[in-house]
Image (cartoon, rainbow, N blue to C red):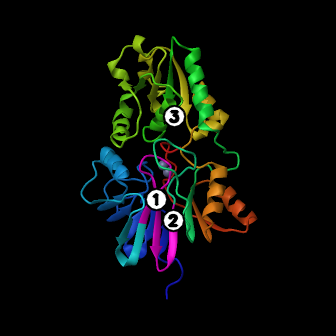
Amino acid sequence: MSTPLSWIEPHPHGIFIAPADCWIDPSRAVPRALVTHGHADHARGGHGETMATPETLAIMQLRYTTRQGTQPAQYGETIRLRGGVAATFLPAGHVLGSAQILLEHAGERVIITGDYKRRPDPTCPAFAVTACDILITEATFGLPVFTHPPIAEEMAKLLKALADHREQCVLVGAYALGKAQRVIAELRAAGHHAPIYLHGAMEKMCRLYQDFGVDLGELRLVADHTREEMRGAIVIAPPSALADRWSRRLPDPITALASGWMRVRGRARQRGVEVPLVISDHADWNELTQTIEEVNPQETWITHGREAALLRWHQLHQRRARALALVGREDEEDD
Ligand SMILES: [Zn+2]
Ligand SMILES: [Zn+2]
């Protein structure tokens, strides 16, 4: 008889499922990978075979011209891996196509959350709470100081900045996969139906979202329009473009940045952001602890961020936990 859970091995460059000879979100190319979602710190190109949701595979194809060997898994569909391991992809509520992966073997259940959040997001289905023995959770915002405000408040801030500067434009920095489309969809939900202008680097990913049925309204490319046309408009660009000469073509932009890190005042100041928008696609402290309580695993493995406070929380609540040291999980893209 094997030791309980000896079949799942955390390594610095990913989680290895020994009987299936398969990796989860490996940070280097491997023969077989299960990928939770398309962000660069989880999805690398060059694997022999990649198993992921159809949305994540499409995102990877767009970014890496993925080679042969992809196996799509719909949410809720169970895939039989070698060695008697079953894998089921479940919604994680993080970005389009994002999944938790439930692994079952020898009567034991392990869930790797990937990145996740619990707030509603019009661009992807909500996180599915699922029972398991071991929960391997991210902890990007694993400090009690991190509480994300309701997104409606942040949208109101953004729309007020726009209304107060009709002769200018509001330039919103947002990462190209996930954050940009969520901000656009939330603006539409808040009743903003005017065309939204995009930096060229956003275009393909927005089209991909639209191809998967996410309604983003009318989008225009900055490059195709004049400064005059963009007065009173919202423009979305990668955060790196905020301070770039590219923004000189815009009509006196007011700069905003959508990121969970905007909770930290110094970060907004440091980047010269006039309208900090605290919008994150990760669970905040309360969502992390709520999720652990709801899933109620025998043990939590913490990865991907600030583990110390969450380890302490487990002690205080008589729960078992350990921290995993995975490398390369602090991607700037992912906030
Ligand atoms: Zn991540
Ligand atoms: Zn992510």
Q: Is residue 31 left or right of residue 254?
A: left
The earlier-in-sequence mark between 3 and 1 is: 1
Furthest residue to the bottom? 1
Q: Is residue 330 magenta?
A: no
Q: Nearer the viewer, mark 2 or mark 1?
A: 1
The answer to whether 153 is drawn above or below residue 30 in the figure is above
Q: Is residue 277 visible?
A: no
Q: Which residue is mark 2?
A: 111
The answer to whether 78 is drawn above or below residue 99 in the figure is below
The image's mark for residue 90 is: 1
Q: Is residue 282 left or right of residue 49?
A: right
How far from the left and from the top, in percent, is residue 156?
60, 27
Q: Which residues are magenta?
A: 88-112
Q: CA distance from mark 2 to mark 1?
A: 9 Å
Residue type beneath disc 2: Ile
The earlier-in-sequence mark between 2 and 1 is: 1
